[in-house]
Image: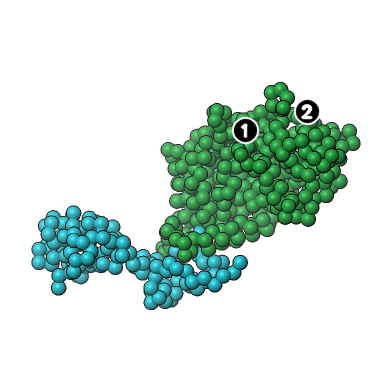
Chain colours: A cyan, B green
Amino acid sequence: MTVERQHAIQPYAPAVQREIHKAGEWHWEDRWRDLPAGGTVPQGGTSENYVTGGWRSDKPIFDAVTCTHCLLCWVFCPDSAIDLDDGKVTGVAYDHCKGCGICAYECPKQDAMVMAPDTQELPQ
Amino acid sequence: MRPDTGRVAMTGNEPGALAMKQVRPDVVAGYPITPQTELMQQFAQYVADGESETELILVESEHSAMSAVIGASATGVRAMTATSANGLALMWEMLYIAAGYRLPISTMLVSRSLGGPINIHCDHSDAMGMRDTGWIMLFAETAQEAYDNGIMATRIAEHDQVRLPVMTVQDGFITSHTTQVLSILTDEQVSEFVGIYRPKKSLSNFDQPMTYGAIVLPDFYMDVKRQQAEAMDNSPRFVEQVADEYAELTGRRHEALESYRLDDAQVALVVLGSAAGTAKDAIDIMRERAIAVGLLKVRMFRPFPRVEVAEALSRTRAICVLDRSLAMGAPMGPLAADVAASLVTGRRAPPLYNAVYGLGGRDITIADFEGVIEEAAEVAQTGAPKATVRYVGLRGNEE
């Protein structure tokens, strides 16, 4: 039974798919036979392409004024979603932050990372 | 009491352990369960004596044993374990993982009933519980076959075109704890035969990072499973290649199926494991009494050689498939159901019924087999089995 199927679920945006195509050994359009065996991912660094920010209901809000750049949030973040520049926290990578709140919990200043509903606008 | 090469007398567990030592796995995970315990104990002795350089991990359960070898195998090393009965049942979910990740793990199963009531003796209820997990399954009639399968399993599993886990099965106590004479190879011969395992991809190849175990959702899962099914369907020709090479080395050729006096048989028995030996003796006796009976022994139960089974049996007039396990509530036992399915998709389907025997280690004797053959010969005349499932060797009459 051969069916040309447009799969409803495609977690990668088309632009990201093109990037994966360039880097990897397989292609989104591949037939079942040509996919990597065993559901393995045959290359590194692909989680960056997989946007998980949509899973979030609360989000951390970063306050650069109170932050002492102790980097505990960066150490504890399970999704590597704390952005750094030259050893200083610059904010949160919201494409990958799932809103777990560990950064806000670990923040010794308590107010450098504060959880708020995801609907709240970021401070300018 | 170190066995020298050549002809030796050993219980079935000992050549299991010897094969495990000789294929030189990098990692073995062990957890004791009767009747497999002796196998792992002997292997642990090899490690303790410095005869094996294997990293032997004594884990806290069979679930952990299978998990440990899955982890080891994903890093690109040769990994093995062994178990029986409830131990295999505890591994169950991990058996699917090993096969689904296409990891070339080989494992030795010393078959035992699953109970309850608790029983430590042989039947195939443990093996049948894993028949759909995606492992290649090879059954042994003798200690010799258990040894040979144990060596070939590594080559089959690691074959680039296969990459599926392999379970080799011997009958608990009947084979594992009785002494038989068999031929063994030297460590060097086996080492050369199995070679060094060098996977193209693994977790410890840092030049090409990769992931095992990522979630695969509806957009890819079915395609990955279809691929796995194809690998299973394609594996027999590579199993055969390995069997050919093994035959060149040893003179022993192990086919997926073994036929015994089947060419002109009107009545066919089909059986797995050690009972095949008893069946052959009974067949010789019944042939003297002019009953044209033969045997089809299934060595490779997964993938099931359905075309060859149909071919081997289609010219008979009655088929009795013997199952050493029950499939509660199913139309027939597992082996009978597979044979029946193979026949209906073949050219001709002779009358077929199922005989259940040997549960929990109940002996099946030559006299039992004579009774089975007499009944099957009647079915060849009448074309109508007395029942779909018969039971051999019950206390009192069957009715």
Query: Which mark is first along the chain, 2 or 1?
Result: 1
- Asked whether residue B112 appears in the rendered view, the answer is yes
Circle 1 residues within 10 Å: few <14, some 14–19, many ≥20: many
Image quadrant where residue B336 sits: top right
Contact between marks 1 and 2 (CB within 8 A): the answer is: no
Above/below status of B73 relative to A81: above
Mark 1 residue type: Cys
Side of A80 where A104 appears, left or right? left
* Residue B103 visible at all: no
- Per the rendering, the mark at residue B122 is 1
User: Do marks 1 and 2 share a subunit?
Assistant: yes
Residue occupying the point 72% across, 55% down: B345
Residue visible at 59% across and 34% down in the picture: B112
Q: Chain of mark 2?
A: B
User: Which element carries disc 1, helix, strand or loop?
Assistant: loop
Point out the image quarter for the N terminus of chain A: bottom right
Q: Position of residue B87 (x, y in %)?
A: 51, 38
Q: Which residue is mark 2?
A: B367
Dividing the picture into quadrants, the one containing residue B368 is top right
